[in-house]
Amino acid sequence: MTLPDAHEPTFQTARKSEFSTAEIGALAHLYRGEVYRSTVWRTRLDSSTNWAVVTTGIALSATYSSAQASPLPMVLVGLLVSVFLLFEARRYRYFNVWRARARLLETDFYAPMIRGEGVRRDPSWTELLAKDYVDPRYHISFARAVGRRLRRTYAWIFVIQAIAYYGKLAIHPVPLASFADVLERAAIGPIPGSLVIAAGVLFHGGWAVFALITLRMEIASRRERGSLIAMG
């Protein structure tokens, strides 16, 4: 058996500590591409939000068009806005992928360069970004995406819907005189008003509980990720 010479040099593959000029240029183009894709999906998020706002406005117009108009449109629009919320949550999961990549490049590539620290290969973010390209996947669950869009946008739409619905019952056709009038006006055909109001409270209360639960999930996820906030 032949033993290697102790003076014979051994060659090891060493990882470069800094990016070359060509690699920096490639990362710059990569960043531009990620910003463009995140902008496109951000526009799609705005579209679904606009649909929810427009349909709520149409329901308000129909409900308050006359004192004899039914409050039913305000009930149905809540279901329609919920569908738009689910659509937007699905789009947000795509948007979050491109946003996270662009944000990671900003915080760990461009920020050190601007501070004059140079552009170095730091495994804490380069390996994370490379893995995200090799094995792309969503960074958040569908439930967390729904919770984010609910807390940031759709909660306000639901609040407006609930206030408008109560306002309709309170003033049309005449101002309320007793709680029995509320139950009478809330009735929808053979469905008693008490059941309709209970369903509305359950509907909005359920969304409120869902928002709080997903918020706790967000906090736990951020603690687990530590400083890598961008990728989630």
Image (cartoon, helix red, strand yellow):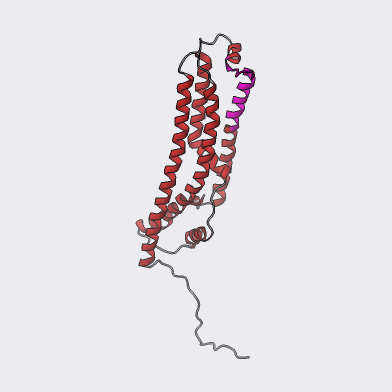
Q: Which of 84 and 8 is in front in this view?
A: 84
In this rendering, the answer to whether 139 lies above or below 57 is below
Residue 140 in percent (x, y) is at 55, 48
Q: Does the magenta stretch include residue 154?
A: no
- Horizontally, residue 2 falls left or right of residue 107, namely right
The majority secondary structure of the magenta stretch comes to helix
The residue that appears at 61% across and 11% down in the rendered structure is 180
x then y, percent, for residue 215:
56, 40
The one of 58 and 200 positioned closer to us in this rendering: 58
Q: What residue sits 50% from the left and 44% below the top?
A: 91
What residue lies at 47% left-to-right and 61% top-to-bottom? 126
Q: Which of 20 and 67 is in front in this view?
A: 67
As displayed, is residue 77 above or below residue 93? above
Quadrant placement of the N terminus: bottom right
- In the image, residue 189 above or below residue 78: above
Residue 194 in picture, x, y percent from top left: 63, 18
Residue 111 seen in render: no
The residue at 47%/18% (across/down) is 64
In the rendered image, the residue lying farthest to the front is: 189
User: Which quadrant of the view contains residue 211?
Assistant: top right
Magenta part of the protein: which range? 185-206
- Give residue 159's position: percent from left, percent from top: 51, 27
> Is residue 126 in view from this perspective?
yes
